[in-house]
Structure formats: structure tokens, C-alpha cells
Amino acid sequence: MGCFISTPNAPGETRRKPKNVGEIAVFVPGLRIPKPVDFAEPIGDELSRRLVERLSALRTRIVVMAGQEAPMATKPRRKATQHGGSTLADLQQALEDYLPILLGLVENGVYMISGNQLQDKLQFPWLNQEDDAEETTMANSWYEILSVLQMMTMLSLSQANLLLLPKTSTDGYQSKVSVAQNFISCKILSQLLKATISDSIPECRRESIDMFLKAAGYLDFAVNNVLPQLPPEIRKNLPMDLTEGVLRAFCMQSLGQGVDVQLGMAIDSVNATVAVKRRFACELVKYWHEAQENIVNLPLANGWGDKHRLFVRWNFTFQAAAYYLHGLILDEGKTEGCSEMAAAALRAADEFLKESKMTCESFHMTPPLSRNPPLWGTSKYLSEKIPKDISSRLPVNPGPQNYEMILQTAPALPDFQLSLKPEDFILPSVDSSWKEN
């Protein structure tokens, strides 16, 4: 079944907590860092020396690269490597190279050696980020696979963050364009593809959607196919970073941020209708509601955990967009009561915008400190439109109305089917060197 060890915080430990991460568009709670493992001693002569050395070399490469990358993972300015890529992309490739040989430890018929389960003989230590424990070590190879997929997720989110931040000539990662089929699967998106907006910035935004869908794909696979492989005792003692609730929350966040980018592009497009924008906004509310439901009762801690909870809460208040756009459509209606419902929707949008600004401030003031990049898309649109419409379309003294009353009188939002789905992901085939062994 494997064993586990959780190491509490202690003076002089190595978990790195930056004081300030600068501008961020995507929440990434640092990187869980693997610590070195001696494969030779527990394995002994049960595997070929060549296989053990290869397994060790691939993991050591990740240990070294992750240790170098971790302090930079949340930095807003990065430089490309000499080959034109990013260290994020290099680390991602290292993880993809490691997976096929790692899978040999868990593949049926392969890990049964000398009557023992080899996957339970190896101890895999990782430094945590959102858990109280400094480090969690588990003797289970599925735990190692889960940790690898979680790191691949965080790297994809880091790449999305870089793509959404203002660029300089030395900025880092430039991914190859492979706009996910999810982005074009919904018929209403065809209007966006005809948009006459500038080429460079929207291209980065489209690429960020690709990264969000990749991240969601890793997490969706981890929750549905890797977590069930872990014995109940191991699952119960997983660090907070790897619990089902946190993984599902990050999956919904990734999809939600992908829709947020789509909404921002629709707002900037001269061809997208209000109905298209409203659909995106209503979908956005559902994604962030699910994210919030998954972490609301989790004991997130350690600064990163507190910041994670506030990030989800902040984005859930983007209900302001849904109510504002819904109000615009109601205001065009000709049936009785439409104008009153439109006014109620505008008041609700205004309340959520105020709450969003307060939660945003709390998020950025929670250590590690951060700040917003220049406003664009949804945030800029709402900050300009809602105050203007409140002053021009509603009475100056509407009477005593508190937050609860305003939300109670707000019209129900339309319910749309969610259009973005996680990108399909499957584990690679086991490395051929296991057959040679």
C-alpha cells in the first residue's frame, strides 16, 4: 500500500515563498519541487543498471530544473533560452520525457519483481506549496505520477500567465499555435473569428486559451484516472496541493479563465453581439461557482492557500458581467416589466463590481504581494460601462436598498451549456527499456 511521511514547517527549511510576485493574470501557487531520490538502494539488482540509471537521470534533471525554475515561476518578466524557448517549456519537456519510464513502475505485469510491488519500495519526496506540511514523502509511484501531472498543470498556467501579461522584446515563452478545437466547436464563436482587431495581442490570448485547456486536461485525467489508483490511506494523507478538491478547483479555474479570455476578445470585437458576450459571461459564472464549491471547505493555508481562496472568490464576482450584459438585452425587450428587470440587473452588476474591486484588493494584498496588469477586456469594459450607466439610467435616490435586497430582486440569469471542455490527455506508452529489462 505504500507509506507516507509529512514534514511540518521548521526553521531553516527550503520551501520558497516570494514576498512579491508582481503583475499576475493567472494564479499559480509556485511549484511543488521534487527532492532527490536514490533509486539504486531500494531497487538493488531487481532492475538492470542501465534502466535504474536512466530513471535516476531523468528525475534528477527535473529536480535540478525545478529548483532553478521555482523562484522564477511567478515572475512577470522572463527571458528566452539560447534555443529560443523558455525554461518553462524545457521543464515541461523534461516531465514528458520522465513519464514513459516512470509508468513502468505501475504497469501491470511489470512492477511485480521478486514477489514484491516495486512501486511501493521507492520513496518520492516533494516540497508542497498550499499545505501546512513543508514536505510530503510517499512510497507509491502513482503519487509520483500525480505530482508530475500537477507540475505540468502549473507550468501550463504559468505559460498562460506570461501570454496574458504585457510583453517586452525579451519576454519568454512563445508557444506554437494550436488553438484547441474547443475554441471553435461552439457555433457562436464563428462571429469572433471574423473580428477585425489587432493581430499580435489577440494571438497571445488565443494561445493562452490553449494553455488553459491543456492544464484542465491534465487535471481532469489526474482526478478521474490517477487518484482512483491510490489506496484510501494514501488519498487521505495527500498534501492539500494534490487533494481532489484543489485539483477540481484548478480544472474549473483553467476553463473559467479560458472563457474569460474569450469574453474579453468578444468585447474587443466589433462583430460579436451582446448575446454572444452574455453567453460567455453566464458560462463564466458557472465555472467559477464550481471552482468555489470545490475549495470552500478545504483548510487552505500558508499564504498561497489564502491567496487561492481569494482568487476564486474574486473571479466569482465577475457575475457583474453576466448581470450587466443580461440587463442590456432585457432593456431591448418590448414586454411589460422588461425595463424594471433591466434596472434590477444593472443594480446587481454594480454591487458585484464593487465586491469584485474589494476582493481584488484583498487578493493582491495577501502575501505574496501582487498587482493587476493593465486592465483590458472584461475588467476594463465593466469599470467603464457600469458606473456610467448607473448614473445615467437609474434614479439618483432609488430608496433604501441593501446588498441582499438588490440580489433578491435581480432577474435570474439564463442557463447555458458549458462550451469549453478539458483537452483530451492520455498517459504515454511505457518506455521500451522496460521490455528489454
Image: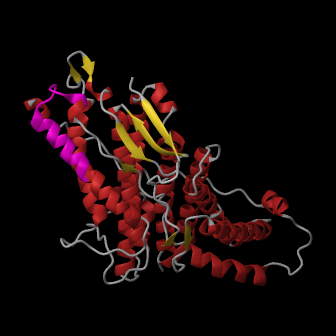
Quick check: 153 above or below 360?
Answer: above
Q: Residue 87 in the image: x percent, y percent?
A: 28, 65
> Which quadrant holds the C terminus?
top left
- Is 399 in front, or is 159? 159
Residue at the spot x=57%, y=63% of the render?
281
Image-based side of 433 in relation to 150, left or right:
left
Left or right of 277? Residue 103 is left
**In the orientation shown, which residue stands out farthest toward the left?**
436
The answer to whether residue 168 is above or below residue 286 is below
Evaluate whether residue 138 shows in this view: yes
246 and 398: which is toward the camera:
246
Furthest-right residue in this view: 399
Q: Position of residue 413 (x, y in %)?
A: 67, 57
Give the colour scheme shown. secondary structure
Q: Is residue 44 magenta?
A: yes
> Is 195 in front, or is 81?
81
Visible residue check, residue 432: no
| Residue drawn at 43 percent across, 75 percent down | 165
Characterize the magenta stretch by its predominant secondary structure: helix
Which region shows up in magenta? 42-61
Magenta residue check for 269: no
Outermost residue on the front side: it is 11
Q: Percent position (x, y) of residue 269?
A: 47, 78
Residue 159 screen position, x and y as percent: 37, 65
Is 368 placed left or right of 337 in the picture? left
